[in-house]
Image (spheres, rainbow, N blue to C red):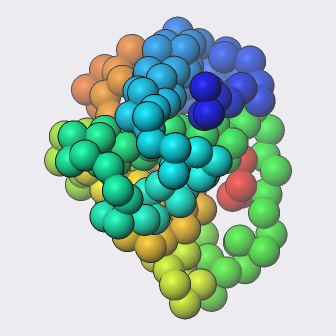
Amino acid sequence: MSYELPKVPYDYDALEPAIDEQTMNIHHNKHHAGYTKKLNNAVEGYADLKGLSAESLLENLNSLDVSEEDRKAIRQNGGGYVNHRLFWEIMGPEKDVDEDLVADIEDEFGSVDTFKDEFAQAASGVFGSGWAWLVRNSDDKLEVYSTANQDSPYLNGYTPVIGLDVWEHAYYLEHQNERGSYIDAWWDVLKLLP
Ligand code: MN3
């Protein structure tokens, strides 16, 4: 297996009550593990792709010499693979504020609260399944946007900094259909920002 399911760097119950233990367990062991397995299946048989990071697969998706079926599988599962890996990393039971990021957010958005409002709007506005993102564009400038399904910012030439999974599988057990309640609670477990 080229791509391995990363460990979650805290206990599954560590993010309660924002994210409950059962959701974390299923999300990591079923959903993320599934994307990882299907990504490996999609690249199997392409010697040229061996050793490429999942990020490079996505950045160069359109030029990969693969079948259209496998290109689609790499887009979906490669996205699912890298999106969730970032998601686990940026959360935690305790704040570990990234002061450089805070300064850049203040420069770009005026304040952390203004950024949070804009980001929450992007997250609320995702129709169906997808992600809200804070990314750095090719000029290293911060931008907020959203993607559908498991589409990764790397597909658009962006580098993701913060990502929020707004698929129902991410919040339904604890928050049912209340995506807004999940988004509000999530700022407590996003460790990077105060
Ligand atoms: Mn998910």
Q: Nearer the viewer, residue 126 or 158?
A: 158
Report which quarter residue 152 is drawn in: bottom left
As drawn, 29 above or below 164: above
Q: Nearer the viewer, residue 5 or 105?
A: 5
**Quarter placement of the N terminus:** top right
As drawn, 191 above or below 134: above
Q: Looking at the image, which residue is at 54% across and 56% down? A: 55
Provide residue 165's location: percent of width, then percent of height.
42, 41
Q: Nearer the viewer, residue 103 or 47?
A: 47
Q: Nearer the viewer, residue 71 or 101?
A: 71
**Quarter placement of the C terminus:** bottom right
Provide residue 76's location: percent of width, then percent of height.
33, 41
As drawn, 106 above or below 176: below
Asked if residue 39 can be seen in this view, the reply is no
Query: Outermost residue toward the top?
Result: 22
Q: Looking at the image, which residue is at 37% across and 59% down? A: 64
Report which quarter residue 153 is drawn in: bottom left
As drawn, 53 above or below 138: above
Asked if residue 151 can be seen in this view, the reply is yes
Q: Looking at the image, which residue is at 60% across and 40% down? A: 85
Provide residue 186's location: percent of width, then percent of height.
54, 40
Query: Outermost residue toward the left?
Result: 127
Position of 46 with respect to 88 (left or right) is left
Q: How many marks?
A: 0
Provide residue 23's location: percent of width, then percent of height.
49, 16
Q: Looking at the image, which residue is at 55% across and 75% down? A: 136
